[in-house]
Image (cartoon, coloured by chain):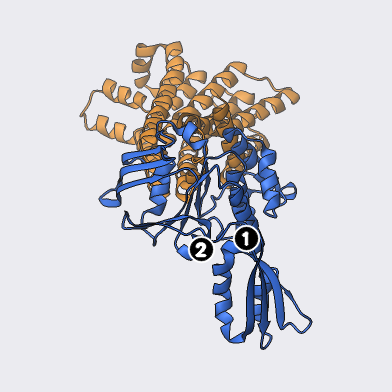
Chain colours: A orange, B blue
């Protein structure tokens, strides 16, 4: 356990000094600051006003940025460290591979999740000072959703890092994974449905296998519990899970994807050449 | 007596390239082995197998234990100095704390060895490791490797970036471990490490092509007093001698200083570049 925390701490310190982390923090802090500056809390869209409006916009933007950012930075730093000889040296110290791999995941998780969450927390803090009503239910669920999103893509990133033997390959693979998830979000599924190759229920089920789609739908469900904006697809989703059931599914399923990927990554890492 | 390190029919293949080809080797307690060979001979791969960083065919055992399946126990007994320092962004202080905590040693032992090597850590504890000079990095990595009770020292060109003064102290530090540590020192060139070792293993194309004992005539702690007289002053040679902490006479034509015994070949190699300038040269084994 001591080795695990030592490794986690090491990864946190390394990340805090890395350029990517500074940009990452700046982006999410900047988003919240800009949303306040542009008076989003005063604007009204689809009946939403105040901090709810800001949080809805924030999570939409985060869903677009966080996955690719987590994937690319994870594979770049892990595969990059391996290429640069960091693994050769640090893994010559008496640290167990379990502690090393999972310690790295824990450290990176904290570093990835903290700026996103703290930016949202800062928004809540500012709203409290400004006497703007805080939608605690939305804030709590979105925080959980961001936490799960970080687990999911961190796990995928660690698996790619364990499989790829070079930074270039790892980056390319991470980008392809993100692109595939993005395409299956709408474009390909819509095309398939238009061609009538599969039943709409199957297409919706396939879409729900995509964690990006799950996050998007779950974020929508917080302010549109009947998922009216999804049209007929909403019937499949709600018939299958129910509104509460889907919210739970959106937290459990991506977590499982992340953990399974991380476990697979650990298995590959443990069995293969380390540096 | 059971050897400290045993390689038995060790083979490693990367895709189709066989980098290690059936290495069998026993290294006993207290042996100091020079592992030499050209680039691509398999030295680094052998070291990585020894450290349990690579999968391999055959067996590797350190004190009877496999480095892959008994990682922490085995690596707890190995001090490793890589040829190229890793580009770590962490502060020096944290690297020392991290290594010391994992190895179960007191960070002050690392500090003490770094100090002996001429590296004062107090002023650089907050500096990123990657921002240190090549020599400082090397000294710190040596201090981390020697600042614990390692039974095996594995060093890849350990003295390459050290100045003559630090090399002298480094040899002294190794001499203090002669009785209780087995050493593997890897290098491209034998003359760089010949004085440090009592056995030479040369590798080529993944095989051992030479395994020989070295007559242990030079002790690690020997110091030679040296006097060089020049027929004329040459700034480049003066700079080289100043690097070895030599002092000059008033006319800059007579230089005197001390060199570490194991460094004599290296020193003479430098002097040989200026042979035409040397009118007199003496090396006297002064003290041990």
Mark in front: 2 vs 1: 1
As drawn, the residue found furthest toward the bottom would be: B231
Residue B90 coordinates in the image, percent (x, y) = 62, 44
As drawn, the residue found furthest toward the left would be: A197
The one of A21 and B195 positioned closer to us in this rendering: B195
Circles 2 and 1 in contact, beta carbons < 8 Å = no
Q: Quadrant of residue A209?
A: top left
Dot 1: chain letter: B
The one of B222 and A203 positioned closer to us in this rendering: B222
* Picture layout, residue B13 above or below residue A133: below
The one of B92 and A128 positioned closer to us in this rendering: B92
Q: Which residue is mark 2?
A: B192
Check disc 1 and report its element: helix, strand or loop: loop
Q: Which residue is mark 1?
A: B222
Residue B67 coordinates in the image, percent (x, y) = 42, 36
Position of the C terminus of chain B by quadrant: bottom right
Q: Quadrant of residue B71?
A: top left
Dot 2: chain letter: B
The one of A217 and B209 positioned closer to us in this rendering: B209
* Picture layout, residue A244 above or below residue B164: above
Q: Is residue A98 left or right of residue B123?
A: left
Position of the N terminus of chain B by quadrant: top left
Packing grade of label 1 (10 A; few <14, some 14-19, many >=20) is: some
Task: Give the mark, 2 or 1, whose residue is nearer the N terminus.
Answer: 2
Q: Is residue B7 left or right of residue A58?
A: left
Q: Quadrant of residue B92?
A: top right
Instruction: Please say whether residue A206 is visible from this viewpoint.
Output: yes
Mark 2–mark 1 distance (CA, rounded to whole Å): 16 Å
């Amino acid at each position: 356990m001591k080795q695990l925390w030592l490794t986690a701490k090491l990864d946190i310190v390394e990340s805090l000094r890395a350029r990517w982390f500074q940009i990452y923090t700046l982006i999410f802090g900047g988003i919240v600051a800009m949303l306040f500056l542009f008076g989003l809390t005063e604007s009204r869209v689809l009946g939403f006003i105040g901090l709810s409006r800001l949080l809805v916009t924030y999570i939409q933007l985060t869903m677009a940025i966080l996955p690719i950012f987590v994937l690319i930075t994870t594979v770049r730093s892990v595969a990059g460290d391996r290429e640069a000889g960091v693994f050769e040296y640090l893994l010559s110290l008496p640290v167990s591979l379990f502690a090393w791999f999972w310690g790295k995941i824990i450290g990176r998780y904290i570093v990835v999740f903290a700026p996103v969450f703290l930016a949202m927390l800062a928004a809540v803090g500012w709203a409290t000072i400004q006497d703007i009503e805080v939608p605690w239910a939305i804030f709590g669920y979105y925080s959980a959703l961001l936490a799960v999103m970080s687990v999911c893509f961190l796990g995928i990133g660690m698996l790619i890092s364990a499989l790829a033997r070079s930074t270039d390959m790892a980056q390319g693979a991470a980008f392809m994974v993100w692109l595939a998830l993005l395409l299956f979000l709408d474009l390909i599924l819509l095309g398939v449905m238009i061609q009538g190759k599969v039943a709409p229920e199957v297409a919706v089920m396939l879409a729900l296998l995509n964690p990006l789609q799950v996050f998007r739908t779950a974020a929508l469900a917080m302010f549109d519990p009947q998922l009216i904006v999804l049209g007929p697809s909403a019937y499949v989703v709600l018939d299958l899970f129910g509104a509460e059931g889907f919210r739970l599914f959106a937290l459990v399923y991506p977590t499982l994807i992340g953990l399974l990927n991380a476990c697979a990554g650990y298995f590959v890492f443990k069995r293969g050449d380390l540096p | 007596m059971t050897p400290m390190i045993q390689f038995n029919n060790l083979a490693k293949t990367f895709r189709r390239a066989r980098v290690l080809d059936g290495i069998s080797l026993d290294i006993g307690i207290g042996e100091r082995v020079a592992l030499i060979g050209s680039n691509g001979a398999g030295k680094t791969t052998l070291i990585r197998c020894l450290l349990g960083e690579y999968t391999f065919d055959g067996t590797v055992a350190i004190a009877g234990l496999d480095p892959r399946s008994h990682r922490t126990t085995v690596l707890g007994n190995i001090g490793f100095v890589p040829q190229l320092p890793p580009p770590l962004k962490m502060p020096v202080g944290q690297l020392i704390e991290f290594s010391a905590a994992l190895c179960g040693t007191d960070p002050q032992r690392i500090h003490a060895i770094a100090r002996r090597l001429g590296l004062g850590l107090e002023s650089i504890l907050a500096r990123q490791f990657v921002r240190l000079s090549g020599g400082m990095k090397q000294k710190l990595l040596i201090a981390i490797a020697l600042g614990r009770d390692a039974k095996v020292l594995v060093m890849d060109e350990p003295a390459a970036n050290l100045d003559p003064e630090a090399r002298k102290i480094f040899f002294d530090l190794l001499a203090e471990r002669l009785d209780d540590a087995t050493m593997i020192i890897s290098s491209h060139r034998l003359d760089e490490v010949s004085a440090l070792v009592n056995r030479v293993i040369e590798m080529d194309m993944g095989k051992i092509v030479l395994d020989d004992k070295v007559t242990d005539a030079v002790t690690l702690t020997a110091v030679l007093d040296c006097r060089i007289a020049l027929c004329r002053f040459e700034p480049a040679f003066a700079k080289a001698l100043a690097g070895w902490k030599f002092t000059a006479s008033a006319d800059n034509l007579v230089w005197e200083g001390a060199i570490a015994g194991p460094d004599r070949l290296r020193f003479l190699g430098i002097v040989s570049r200026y042979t035409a300038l040397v009118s007199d040269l003496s090396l006297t084994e002064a003290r041990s």
